[in-house]
Amino acid sequence: MSSTHHIHILPNGRQIPATPGRNLMESLMDQSVFLRSDCGGKGTCGKCRVKKKLENGNHEIINSCTYTVTEDIKIEIPESSMLSSHIISKAPASLPDVFMDRFKNNSGNQCYGIAVDLGTTTIALYLCDTHKGKILSSLSHKNPQAFYGDDVMSRIGAIGQDKKNLKHLQKLVVRTIEWGIKDLLESLGLQESMVSEMVVVGNPAMIHIFAGVDPESIGVSPYMPAFYKAKNIQTNELGFRLEDVSIQILPQISGFIGGDILSAAVAADLENKPEGTLLVDLGTNGELMLKANGKFYATSCATGPAFEGASLSCGMQAIPGAINKVQIKGQTSLPEYTFINPSKHAGLKPSGICGTGVISAVAQLCKNNIIAPGGAFQKDLILSMLKKDASGNMVYGIVQENFSKEGSKIFISQKDIRSVQLGKAALITGIEFLLKEAGIDKPEKIIVAGAFGSFLDKKDMMTLGMIPIMDPAKVEIAGNLAGVGAVMVLCDDTCLKKTIEMAKKIHVVDLACDKNFQEVFIKRLNFPNRFSFGDIDYCLGDAHQ
């Protein structure tokens, strides 16, 4: 393909070059025009469709992720195909009081910085006044690298196939972060020149790619990172258009345990928590840290993208329109649900289901005996919500067509349930192996972190067997602690020093090298038959509490 081909975006007439060897979606992303790619660029979801103008004046609908530009083309991009970052004026991250107290007497000039939680599925950005230790605004959006696969191993594999993909994957996140910074600053009437520093946290693979370092060593045994120490890099070294801004990267602990769990541990003040406290940073790559025997134990588990809404039949980010809680009051009852609607718009309808919502929905299906412990929909169950789709597969309807924003049914499929099973089995197996290594039977306290927001229900997690059955009062849902910790590091150098010191004390538990992992993992795929919360005992099929 010649590099002289151009893409004309109507109606404003913007002209951009078609990137040689890339499809239309990638060419648009190279110029910071981001489209939805819910299927990860496989051409199956149709969310990236654009109108290609033909010579006769008509239009042809094309999937931008599978269309190769071989000539000059003119396109129109429907609003529904655009990937939009959702700006949250009241940041979802809650900074610890003891941290904020350090800044209460600070006054005078404002200093601006950006904290970034670079997740495999979601990128969260926080605009901060670093002089006052305050979050001014935040946003999150999908990581466009999902085009190369939902998990880090797929992206490492893409780089292994063609080393040019390292630069391309790096450019995708750099442009996405720039796009987010621009939105945050514009929302408050600020200029890019006012930003003086950044902190970026993430798992080792994401950080390697962001820093332009080949992550090949993470993808092969013994799965070691190319670097461990904290780094400080300038934006111009990474291809940012935003110049002369220093970027702080936290230490890496192992190939799959990185600065994000260190950041979360600082935000949770884990070093001062009771012995037996377990920190679970839950995302596409689950990271666990346990305080026991006067030290820290850590491991990671591939929980998959389902918990962040990705890869689900009707999945989406936890943004306005996403179903975040489901309640089923009996097998024959219509499901009730809530969805994210921060501005209380009366006309807003649900668009899909996020990670919190799918956990809630599957827990309800378990409690009401609509699915068996093995995960399959119960045979011979006749329910108005349980139907076969066009492919003959059973799906459970949450929202009917006329009640959704897109005019299509929002449902839970058998494939979605399997994704939840794989994720929860990986998580509980990782927890069990970590506890065994530390020589304790059960955690004293569990802190659940991640970008799920405040709607994740700890009882739902126990119902599915994601975490050990214990007193719910001893389980804390803490929100995006990795993002909180990144803000703390951005505003206070002593927090960076804490992460560096903590990284030296961690004992890594390598699940990949344990011959018993797969056997235990398979056993944990089933949902529990019976579970107890406090004094109340449940069996699958009991009435909803």
Image: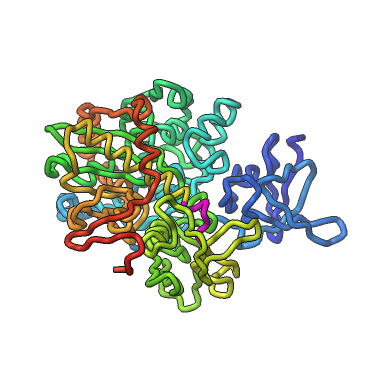
- Viewer-closest of 354 and 83: 354
Q: Quadrant of residue 519?
A: top left
Q: Which sits in the foreground, 460 or 497?
A: 460
Q: Could you tell me residue 336's position as x and y percent?
A: 42, 72
Can you say whether 8 is above or below 540 in the image?
A: above
Q: Which residue corresponds to the image point at 57% horizontal and 43% vertical from the top-left? A: 147
Instruction: Determine if residue 143 is in view.
Output: yes
Q: Quadrant of the C terminus?
A: bottom left
The furthest residue to the front: 380
Range of magenta residues: 412-417
Left or right of residue 252: residue 473: left
Is most of the magenta stretch helix, strand or loop?
Answer: helix
Q: Quadrant of the N terminus?
A: top right
Residue drawn at 19 percent across, 44 percent down: 443
User: How did the renderer colour the structure?
Assistant: rainbow
How many numbered tags mark residues here?
Answer: 0
- 541 relative to 500, above or below: below
The answer to whether residue 198 shows anywhere in this view is no
The percent position of residue 256, horizontal first and vertical second, equals 37, 32
Q: Is residue 219 magenta?
A: no
* The residue positioned farthest toward the bottom in the image shown: 346
Quarter of the rendering containing residue 71: top right
Give residue 479's position: percent from left, percent from top. Answer: 30, 54
Foreground: 501 or 445? 445
Q: In the visual, does 488 lie left or right of 336? A: left
Residue at horizontal 55 percent and vertical 31 percent from the top: 167
Most foreground residue, 328 or 125: 328
Residue 29 position (above or below residue 77): above
Image point 70% across, 61% down: which residue? 11
Residue 200 picture location, percent across and down: 37, 40
